[in-house]
Amino acid sequence: GNLIAHPGAHVVVGGQRIPVTATLLAGDEAEAAYRKMVEVTTAYASYRGRTDRQIRVFRLTPVA
C-alpha cells in the first residue's frame, strides 16, 4: 500500500542506491512479471500458494 500512496522509492543494487518510481501492474502484465520473479526464486511461488490474497506486482523504473 505504501508504494501505491507514494510511488517514489529507492532500491539498492550492488551497493548503489537508485531512485525509482513504482507502477502497480495488473492483469496479464502482472502475471507475466510474477512468472519472471518465480524464475529468479521459487520462494515467490510457494508464497502465492500459502495465501488467498492478491500479491501486488510493481514495475520499478529508475528516475532519470
Image (spheres, rainbow, N blue to C red):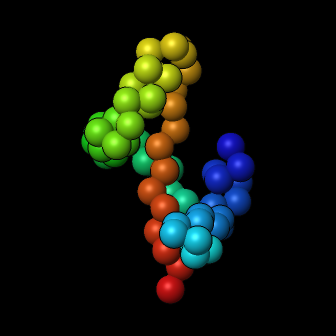
Q: Residue at x 49, y 23 (%)?
A: 47
> Picture coordinates of residue 21 (x, y %)?
56, 67
Residue with the most extreme bottom position: 64
Please identify the quadrant where the N terminus is shown: top right
Q: Residue at x 71, y 49 (%)?
A: 2
Depth check, front residue: 61 or 16 = 16
In the picture as drawn, the residue positioned furthest to the front comes out as 15
Residue 18: image x %, image y %?
Answer: 57, 74
Q: Camera-side residue: 42 or 53? A: 42
Q: Is residue 35 above or below residue 63?
A: above
Q: Give the total of numbered labels.
A: 0
Q: Is residue 31 visible?
A: no
62 versus 5 height, above or below: below
Query: Camera-side residue: 61 or 39?
Result: 39
Left or right of residue 15: residue 42: left
Above/below status of 39 relative to 53:
below
Residue at point 49% right, 50% down?
58
Asked if one can make out residue 15 in the rendered structure from this viewpoint, the answer is yes
The answer to whether residue 62 is above or below residue 6 is below
Quarter of the view holding residue 49: top left
* Image-based side of 32 in relation to 16, left or right: left
In the displayed structure image, the side of residue 26 where residue 56 appears, left or right: right
**Residue 32: x and y, percent?**
28, 42
Identify the residue at image location x=52%, y=38%: 56
In x, y percent, where is residue 55?
Answer: 51, 31
